[in-house]
Amino acid sequence: MQATIVEAVNDALHTEMAADDRVVVLGEDVAKSGGVFRATDELLEEFGGDRVVDTPLSEIAIVGGATGLAMYGYRPVAEIQFSGFLPPAFDQLVSNASRIRWRTRGALNAPMVVRMPYGAGVRALEHHSESLEGAYGHIPGLQIVVPSTPHDTKGLLLSAIRDPDPVLFMEPKRIYRSFREEVPEDDYEVPLGEAAVRREGEDVTVVAWGSMMPPTLEAVEEGDVDAEVIDLRTVSPMDAETVVESVKKTGRCVVVHEGPRSIGVGSDVVARINDEALMYLEAPVERVTGFDTPVPLLSMEDYYFPHPPRILDAMERALSV
Amino acid sequence: MSERESNDRSPSATGAGDGGARYLTQDDLEVPTHRIVAPDGSYNAGAVPDLDDEELRDLYRWMVTDRVFCRRMVNIQRRGELGTFGSTRGQEASIVGSASTLEPDDWLFVGRAWTPMFMRGVPMRDMILFWRGIEEGQKSFAEHNSQIAISIGSHLPLAAGVSWGMDLDDGDAVTTAYLGDGATSTGAAHEAINLAGALRLPALFFCQNNQYAISTNFESQTGASTIAQKALAYGIDAIRVDGQDVLAVYDAVSTAKERVRQGEPVFVESVTYRLDAHTTSDDPTRYRDDEEVERWEEDDPIERYRSFLEAEGLWDDIDHDAIVEEIEAEFDEALAAANEFEQRGVEELFAYVYDEMPPELARQLAEFEDLLERRPEMYDYVEQRPKG
């Protein structure tokens, strides 16, 4: 079938709820309303009110409750309506979900997924536009998955739900419906922790994920650059090997992300390259990112995140040395 | 005697009679709803608050302002002139009755309520700018001690803190935090209300129970039969009021504020209804039926109050059409002023993050300005040009 990213989310949920009756979907407005982005559409009708649950308005209860459900043997898929509303539940991620296995020396685990749309560019209000994968990636024990295509979305979400440890699944909402591609109707997994090479090239490695993939690919096309484009897909744990191998070949690298620059995921990509491929570098690694500012409100949000000219500019800088 | 038994806040132990443990239930608590004007327009004349004719007419005028403003905002949103908008239609009595008690030095944190800011001098232009996603609009909110809280419930600890400061200063002003039924489920609400109860912080928590948090109705939001009763668990006294009755809301909140000025926290639950969608992005037909909405539409708070004004002989002095016309004109003027808001530069993105811009942030700004100059095609990618 031809599907958008948000339809692929919905399809993955239908697929796994039908396959495994331990899968429970919970969150604000996920049942009767089908989710504010319709990601959970028709789940209530198909699987009933015991497995598709409209919760009270409480991120702490949603994430903490999901953790308890998971410890008890269920496979909860919790939705946080917008990524900017996850911070109240940060404590549950830091103090509980990510540590259950460690705390109990493996006696218990928390096989759970917290899904949430992230990123700017949809003309929303304050707290609706954040890209804080760097902050969440700093939590040991938590996996951060960020798909960028409908095909990957379904396969990654199925892997995430089946994974024995907690996954924060960040959905790039700006491109939720911006394109369709073939998504198999059957069951398939895209493994967590593995980057994808979206385009092979010799001159420069460009690393991006999620919402930044379309502008990155556009910049490469427009600039007519022989770039190797890597989609990280899982931010943590990071597939540094794919990046390092590519940089060893190209000698140059640009990393693109939407979140703020400092103490961000891009810093870590640079560090991994320094660790493993410093002597292969022919130019400093460039970072193209959001700014170290809050995401502006809608009138100027389109200035905030990287567009193709910024990405292209950084590629040219990396290639000019 | 154990420490627990010596707790002097606890009543004496029971266990006589059949000796069995007894449940303490919600039925042990009678939670009345304060009302002055009934839905049929009849009213308790002895309970009418002490307001002069002009003030009584003002209540009407502000309720109409709220309704006209919402209608116009929804209309311009549909024309693509706003990102989204959350209408307050149906909640006019709850909003105006409570906000009429505001003094200039009071602090106000609102969830779903815009007219209280107009009542304290915020220009409509700035509210339009806010909903257009222009940060500048919020400057005048702050100048009038007002803020809009988007992250549900997260403002309640702030309200507790501001009232704490007022208490330390022995001030007379009051901090009022508006919240919704949904917010009472958040952790922040519990922690804030508990803090206010424990430290006796003189905050006013004004909860508009408008029956829905997006799609979640009140019955799904909580197992409790009222929100007011939750306050008792935190040691805070509460008033539950009919939120469709502007006089009762005014009376309840005025009464509550007297208590707050004496240094005690108070919780008010105003029972009302959100007639429009949660925001213009929401489709309420997915979760509620038309009959329910119609039932509430029949109990229009503006109409109910009009019955009172008529009975009191005050209606003859009110020219409803002229009021609407005047507010429409005010909105037109505000919209024109908002449209003229001058285009801003990208330095606006970097302003106000810190008192003094750190070197790395200054570097990011300089890099970006340089890029915009060198690569004008950037502007083609900026779908929403800065405008106002």
Image (spheres, coloured by chain):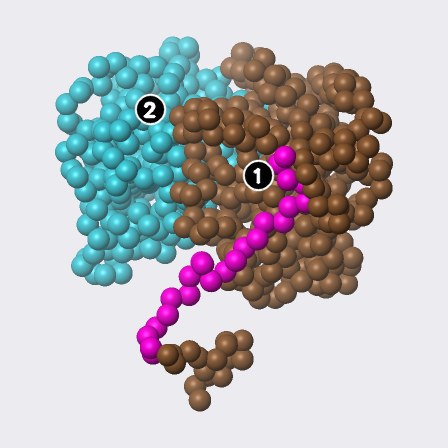
Residue at the disc numbered 2: A6
User: Does residue A221 sit above or below A247 in this rendering?
Assistant: above
Q: Secondary structure at mark 2?
A: helix
Where residue A90 sits: x, y (%)?
42, 49
**Image quadrant assignment for residue B42:** top right
The label on residue B211 is none
The image shows residue B131 at horizontal and vertical percentages of 62, 27
Type of the residue with mark 1: Thr
- Indicate the quadrant where residue B51 lies: top right
- Is residue A125 visible in the rendered image? The answer is no
Q: Which residues are magenta?
A: B18-40
Subunit ID for the residue under disc 1: B
Using residue A280 as the reference point, say whether residue B193 is left or right of it.
Answer: right
Q: Colour of chain A?
A: cyan
Determine whether B368 is above or below A112 in the image.
above
Host chain of mark 2: A
SS at circle 1: loop
The hue of chain B in the figure is: brown
Q: Residue at left 23%, top 61%? A: A104
Three-letter residue code for mark 2: Val
Front position in the image: B81 or B57: B57
| Residue A287 location (% of width, % of height) | 45, 31
Q: Is residue B247 left or right of residue A225?
A: right
Disc 2 crowd, CA 10 A, few/some/many (<14, 14-19, 20+): many
Q: Is residue B171 magenta?
A: no
Q: Which mark is residue B272?
A: 1
Residue A253 coordinates in the image, percent (x, y): 37, 28
The quarter in which the C terminus of chain B is drawn is top right
Q: Is residue B32 magenta?
A: yes
